[in-house]
Image: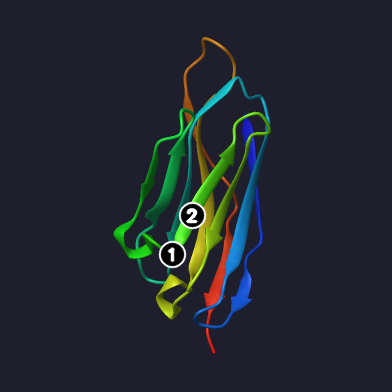
Amino acid sequence: QVQLVESGGGLVQPGGSLRLSCAASGNIFRIYVMAWYRQAPGKQRELVASKTSDGNTNYADSVKGRFAISRDNAKNTMSLQMNYLKPEDTAVYYCFADSEPIRGEARGDFWGQGTQVTVSS
C-alpha cells in the first residue's frame, strides 16, 4: 500500500499564493503519475495538474499560467505552487498517485485525505 499525506492548505485572500505538498510512503516500487485533484462543494472531483515520472505535465485550463506542479521522483514527493488564487479555486485538494507498490504486481490508484484551500477576503 501507498500512503499519501498532503500539507499546506489554508485560508488565503484572492490574488494570494499557497503551496501544497504531498509525501508518499509505504510500499513504493515506482510511481508513474502523481497528480492533484480538487473537489468543491456540490461539484465533482476534477483534475488540477499531473506529472508523470518522465516529466510530462498536464494542467486544467482553469489553472494554466497560475499553478505549477513539481515532483521529486527520488523522494516520492510532489508540490503544487498556486499563485493568483481566485475564490473559485476554493476546494479540498487531493494528492493522487498511480503506483506499482511492489515490482511485478498490479498498479493501483492511491489517494490522500485531502487538504482544504479557501480563497476568500
Describe the element under mark 2 as helix, strand or loop: strand
Q: Residue furthest left?
A: 61
State left or right for residue 22 relative to residue 57.
Answer: right
Residue positioned 48% across, 73% down in the render: 84
Q: Which quarter shows the N terminus? A: top right
Residue holding disc 1: 66
Q: Nearer the viewer, residue 96 or 58?
A: 58
Q: Is residue 72 above or below residue 22?
A: above
Q: Nearer the viewer, residue 43 or 100?
A: 100
Q: Amino acid at mark 2?
A: Ala
Residue positioned 43% across, 68% down in the render: 40
Q: Position of residue 16 (x, y in %)?
A: 55, 77
Q: Amino acid at mark 1?
A: Arg
Residue 68, labelled with which disc?
2
Q: Is residue 111 above or below residue 84?
A: above
Residue positioned 63% across, 47% down in the render: 22
Crowding at mark 2 (Cα within 10 Å: few <14, some 14-19, many 20+): some
CA gap between label 2 and label 1 equals 7 Å
* The quarter of the displayed image where residue 13 is located: bottom right
Crowding at mark 1 (Cα within 10 Å: few <14, some 14-19, many 20+): few
Q: Position of residue 52 (x, y in %)?
A: 45, 33
Residue 102, labelled with which disc?
none
Residue positioned 47% across, 18% down in the render: 106
* The quarter of the displayed image where residue 80 is located: bottom right
Q: Position of residue 50 (x, y in %)?
A: 43, 44
Q: Position of residue 19 (x, y in %)?
A: 61, 61
Q: Residue furthest top?
A: 104
Q: Is residue 114 above or below residue 106?
A: below
Describe the element under mark 1 as helix, strand or loop: loop
State left or right for residue 19 relative to residue 65.
Answer: right
